[in-house]
Image (cartoon, helix red, strand yellow):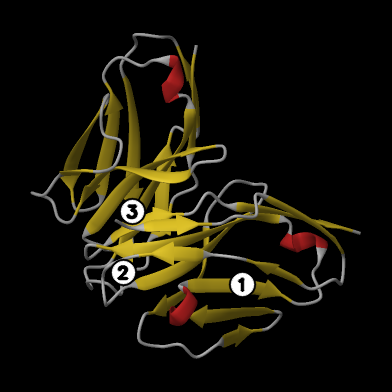
Amino acid sequence: DADVTQTPRNRITKTGKRIMLECSQTKGHDRMYWYRQDPGLGLRLIYYSFDVKDINKGEISDGYSVSRQAQAKFSLSLESAIPNQTALYFCATSDNRGYDDTQYFGPGTRLTVL
Amino acid sequence: AQKVTQAQTEISVVEKEDVTLDCVYETRDTTYYLFWYKQPPSGELVFLIRRNSFDEQNEISGRYSWNFQKSTSSFNFTITASQVVDSAVYFCALNYQGGKLIFGQGTELSVKP
């Protein structure tokens, strides 16, 4: 089984709808992250959480919210989806070891907002 | 501010050619880590290597090698004798503020038979 899973893998929705993307991990890592990938822009950090009680905004948090339900679960919500949120979304996890902090990624969720 | 630049957007080579992917970074941190990830056509992100700022030794893993030079703020990635399976988007990334990653724009490598 994969260490980091994301559901759904693909989603098509309409403008204005609320969407939740879910991430689960079995790696036992404390730290979890949400990124979005757009062509030509690489990956950009949306939100991150260093433990269950910790939530931090990343580079591009506007229009998104997150919930860390447990050490193993980190959900990303789009409160009112808009077309420019069409992107590939990745969840990642890492161990709590400061700078030596390799992130391991889930398979991605491809979201299309019409 | 932290920044990672991969100036090569796309590279196309013929199988068995050697190819180097460039990565230049900016940071004010004295301690940091650099990473390379591979994104094959299937879309997942695969971790390839982590290098800390105190270790400038080159690293070789099979056909892959990495050249880290602090003097030029570069962390370049060379694939020797490229194969079609090497076709992917490759990302360079910098770890900052104790855990966050900033990514370059990615280089799309196409290896043709």
Residue B20 at x, y percent in the picture: 69, 70
Crowding at mark 1 (Cα within 10 Å: few <14, some 14-19, many 20+): many
Label 1 resides on the chain identified as: B
Kindly state the secondary structure of the residue where label 3 is placed: strand
Instruction: Tell me where residue A64 sits by quadrant.
Output: top left
- Marks 2 and 1, how far apart in space? 20 Å
Locate residue B81 relative to residue A73 in the image: left or right.
right
Q: Give the residue drawn at x 53%, y 49%.
A: B105
Q: Which residue is mark 2?
A: A101
Where in the figure is residue B38, as x and y percent of width and height?
58, 59
Query: Which residue is depicted at the point 43% across and 80% down?
Result: B70
Q: Residue furthest right?
A: B113
Labels 2 and 1 in the same subunit: no
- Gap in Å between the C-alphas at discs 3 and 1? 30 Å
Query: Given contact means CB atoms under 8 Å apart, are the residues at marks 3 and 1 in contact?
Result: no
Mark pair 3, 2: CA separation: 16 Å
Q: Nearer the viewer, mark 3 or mark 2?
A: 2
Note whether residue A3 is visible.
no
Q: Amino acid at mark 1?
A: Phe
Instruction: Give the residue pinned by disc 1.
Output: B77
Q: Is residue B41 visible?
A: yes
Chain assignment, label 2: A
Identify the chain of the residue marked 3, using the numbered disc in the image: A
Residue drawn at x 49%, y 75% is B72
Instruction: Evaluate if marks 2 and 1 touch, with contact meaning CB atoms under 8 Å apart.
Output: no
Where disc 2 sits, the SS reads: loop
Q: Along the line of sight, which residue is nearer the eye, A4 or B113? A: B113
Q: Marks 3 and 1: which is nearer the front?
A: 1
Per the image, the residue denoted by label 3 is A25
Q: Position of residue A87 (x, y in %)?
A: 48, 30
